[in-house]
Image (cartoon, rainbow, N blue to C red):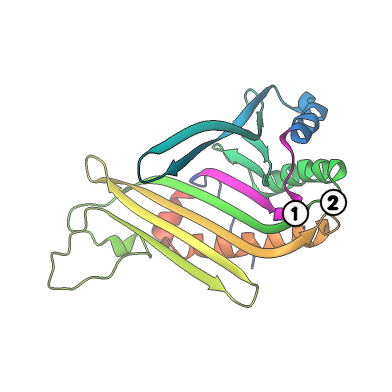
Amino acid sequence: MNWQELKAPPIKEAIFDLRFSSESKLLVEDIEQFCKNIENDFTNTLPIFLFKIEGNASINSSQISHNNVKIGFKLSRENDSSIFQITNDGFTFSKLSPYSNWEDLKNNAFKYLNLLLKYFPNIQFQKIALRYINEFNLDIKLGESINESLLIVPAYSDQLPRELESYFTQLVIPDKNLGLKCIIHFAMQPLQNEKFKILLDIDVIKEQNYSAESIETLKNEFQNLRELKNKVFFNSLTIKVINNFK
């Protein structure tokens, strides 16, 4: 389906993610060398650490130790909201606000994915994901039903007061035909002067094995993820709200 293009989408961050299979986990030393090969594309390179806590307990004593373990690197550019992350277990390309368009996100993500696969030709993937975090403010006047603006609204007894000040809900919706799963986090928080902050976090995932030779298949799969993401977005808000982003 061709979803309408929005001139001012409320996208706070768009995330393009692939997880390596357990057999394909990378060594940090190899990741560092790969990053040096593409460092001309970026102005900032920062290490990514995992905070680990380990403990041993016995009847007489207990010992707890903690340390930071380097697992990869984050690369970025000045005056650019794109971020590329490569760790021992995955690849992530993300775009912070201001968001441009899907083609830009997809092309840049696959540009660095192709470079990664040339350097590590034996990588296998076990999960792919496309996540869009949307955030915007909404006016809901006193006495106005939130159903006039939002389509994901919790149901509760009509014996309770009908004015809803805030809520947070999670939905997990599978698409069994395509083997996808969509995790939706929807929240409404009060601000001032009858304004509310709305969070619509849409994470579409597929767990399946892919090889480095599956690049065209991956492009098609991410298109399917995007279709479901768009379907969720345009069916979570009313036309009244969506018109604000045109």
Residue 184, visible in the rendered structure: yes
Task: Work out whether mark 1 precedes mark 2 in sequence or the reverse, and give the earlier one.
Answer: 1
Q: Which residue is rendered at x = 76% and y = 59% of the image?
A: 218
Q: Nearer the viewer, residue 171 or 90?
A: 90
Residue 47 occupies which quadrant of the picture? top right
Magenta-colored stretch includes residue 21: yes
Find numbered disc 1 in the image and state the secondary structure of the residue it sits on.
Answer: helix
In the image, farthest residue toward the front: 60
Q: CA distance from mark 1 to mark 2?
A: 10 Å
Highlighted magenta segment, given as a residue range: 12-28
Q: Nearer the viewer, residue 209 or 187?
A: 209
Screen quadrant of the N terminus: bottom right
Q: Amino acid at mark 1?
A: Glu
Q: Please indicate whether residue 219 sits to the left or right of residue 228 in the image.
A: right
Q: Nearer the viewer, residue 116 or 27?
A: 27
- Report the residue marked by disc 1: 23
Q: Which residue is rendered at x = 50% and y = 48% of the image?
A: 133
Return the x and y of residue 144 as percentages of the image width and height.
22, 59
Magenta-colored stretch includes residue 113: no
Report the disc number at residue 175. none
Q: Amino acid at mark 2?
A: Asn
Q: Residues within 10 Å of mark 2 (few under 14, many from 20)?
A: few
Residue 246, visible in the rendered structure: no
Return the x and y of residue 32 as percentages of the image width and height.
75, 30
Find numbered disc 2 in the image and state the secondary structure of the residue it sits on.
Answer: loop
**Camera-nearest label, 1 or 2:** 1
Return the x and y of residue 227 as percentages of the image width and height.
62, 63
Q: Which residue is rendered at x = 32% and y = 64% of the image?
A: 153
Report the disc number at residue 122. 2
Q: Which residue is rendered at x = 22% and y = 52% of the image?
A: 141
